């Protein structure tokens, strides 16, 4: 009797489904996007000699003018323009190139970083991020998306989204901007620094009076910048020493 009742119920369910049509089910399909990122790689002195030692990593994101498929363009500004003449430069330095007509895609950059960690002897406690203009925007955005991986960041003449200030409050930040910048107004950096510090953050900003958009020329010549980056690890954080900055700069309080 129990078996008959079960068959009857199943039969009724089948008839009901036939009348109502097929039931929709929830499924998932994951799309993996294939992309290629070209980048300049600088290996510091001693990297090839000591195959056990790990080195700090500096990632530099260029501005919109260096986009394309010719890597020498990336040497125009920022660290790639001078590190080959600095044999004491201590960082593994990676400078990716953004394709022409596109913007920095954070997921692609993150995938690149994960591969770099497999390919090179990177000290993951000492990974640093900097960028100028479009790369400054990319620096703010990448750090906002993955706030726990960088020991410190140094965005130059860029801007971010203040709604993510809480995510950035635990990252040491030294930002730079030209007071006379008409391409990316200084307020884009100022509002980020103020929003982060309002959340209890650790952000400082150097403003260059009478300097326009090319404030990266002064920023990357700050004597203390790279020393300050190295003073930070993911477990140890320090404020930049603004007393040692160039005479024509001023900190944003």
Image (spheres, rainbow, N blue to C red):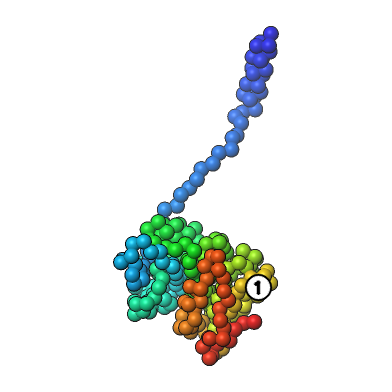
Q: Nearer the viewer, residue 191 or 12?
A: 191
For this view, does 232 lie left or right of residue 164?
left
Q: Quadrant of residue 163?
A: bottom right
What residue is drawn where x is 65% and y is 75%? 194
Q: Residue furthest bottom?
A: 247
Please state, as top left, top right, bottom left or bottom right, where the N terminus lies in the image.
top right
Is residue 185 at least partly visible in the picture?
no
Q: Nearer the viewer, residue 142 or 8?
A: 142
Residue 207, how many percent across, how many down? 57, 84
Q: Nearer the viewer, residue 42 or 217?
A: 42
Count of numbered marks: 1
Q: Quadrant of residue 37?
A: bottom left
For this view, does 28 lie left or right of residue 9?
left
Residue 166, how many percent across, how many down? 65, 65
Please state, as top left, top right, bottom left or bottom right, where the C terminus lies in the image.
bottom right
Residue 67, how many percent across, how many down? 41, 70
Residue 73, how many percent across, how many down? 37, 74
In the rendered image, the vertical position of residue 26 relative to residue 237, given as above or below: above
What residue is drawn where x is 59% and y is 38%? 26
What residue is pinned by disc 1? 197
What residue is drawn where x is 56% and y is 78%? 240
- Which SS class for mark 1? helix
The local crowd at label 1, few if under 14, some if 14 to 19, many if 20 or more residues have their Cα within 10 Å, is: some
Is residue 32 at least partly visible in the picture?
yes
Q: Residue furthest top?
A: 1
What residue is drawn where x is 68% and y is 72%? 198
């Amino acid at each position: 009797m129990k078996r008959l009742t079960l068959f009857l119920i199943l039969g009724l369910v089948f008839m009901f489904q036939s009348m109502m049509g097929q039931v929709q089910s929830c499924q998932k399909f994951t799309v993996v996007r294939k992309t290629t990122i070209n980048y300049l790689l600088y290996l510091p002195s001693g990297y090839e000699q000591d195959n056990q030692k790990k080195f700090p990593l500096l990632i530099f994101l260029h501005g919109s003018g260096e986009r394309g498929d010719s890597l020498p363009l990336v040497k125009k500004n920022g660290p790639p323009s001078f590190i080959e003449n600095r044999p004491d430069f201590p960082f593994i330095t990676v400078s990716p190139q953004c394709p022409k007509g596109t913007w920095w895609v954070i997921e692609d950059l993150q995938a690149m970083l994960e591969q770099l960690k497999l390919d090179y002897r990177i000290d993951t406690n000492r990974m640093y991020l900097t960028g100028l203009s479009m790369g400054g925007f990319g620096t703010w955005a990448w750090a906002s998306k993955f706030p726990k991986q960088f020991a410190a960041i140094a965005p130059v003449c860029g801007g971010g989204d203040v709604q993510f200030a809480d995510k950035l409050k635990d990252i040491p930040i030294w930002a730079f901007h030209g007071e006379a910048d008409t391409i990316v107004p200084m307020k884009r950096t100022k509002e980020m620094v103020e929003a982060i510090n309002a959340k209890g953050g650790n952000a400082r900003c150097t403003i260059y009076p009478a300097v326009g958009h090319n404030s990266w020329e002064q920023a990357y010549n700050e004597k203390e910048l790279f020393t300050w980056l190295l003073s930070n690890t993911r477990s140890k954080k320090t404020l930049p020493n603004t007393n040692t900055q160039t005479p024509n700069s001023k900190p944003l309080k």
